[in-house]
Amino acid sequence: MKYKYICDVKAIDLWKMAMERTYRSSVGLVNIIFTAAMIYMTVRFFTSANDFFKLLMLLGCFLFPVIQPLAILGASARQLEDLPRDMELSFDESGMHVSTGNKSENIHWKKIANAIRQKNMIVIMSDDRHGYMLTNRVLGKEKEEFYNFLCSHIR
């Protein structure tokens, strides 16, 4: 079996992955608790506070649900600038083949650490910190079949 894809990673894909990772961790729980506490404090004390504290309370209410996601989206857009364009990933019985422009690399199955299936993508990990993202837009209806192919060769 052979699979061939052109990577089409957008800033929104990196943003979704970062937000999902944040809100599945203890940091996400702290964000939710802080936001709920700030909303409670704002409702409770807004009318009696001076303008400076009103501004601080509103800023606290918007910090995690609005400001943090916008900051992560900006960081995702900057991160995307560093990624190569028109990267082609192909997979066969010998491993993964990566080509972009005039560069190419062959990665044997034993060097691939893991394949992570998420709602909107599959991430093929070349080590514990680096990976290749294939979104549902790219994978189409082959997502499950391709994931099973990866798992049968990695593990």
Image (cartoon, rainbow, N blue to C red):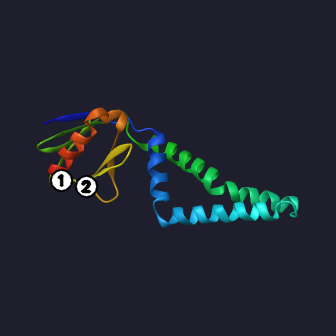
The quadrant of the image that shows the N terminus is top left
Quarter occupied by residue 10: top left
* Res 90 → quadrant: top left
- First-in-chain label (2 vs 1): 2
Q: Position of residue 130 (x, y in %)?
A: 33, 53
The residue at which mark 1 appears reads as: 154
Q: In the picture provided, is 98 more to the left or to the right than 60? A: left
Q: Position of residue 70 (x, y in %)?
A: 59, 47
Residue at point 56% right, 66% down?
A: 30
Image location of residue 5, percent across then percent down = 27, 34
Residue 103 or residue 16, whichever sits in front: 16
**Is residue 10 visible in the rendered structure shown here?**
yes
Q: Nearer the viewer, residue 144 or 137?
A: 144
Q: Are marks 2 and 1 in contact (CB under 8 Å)?
A: yes
124 left or right, relative to 58: left
Dot 2 lies on which element? Answer: strand
Q: Which residue is mark 2?
A: 114
Does dot 1 land on a helix, a strand or a loop? helix
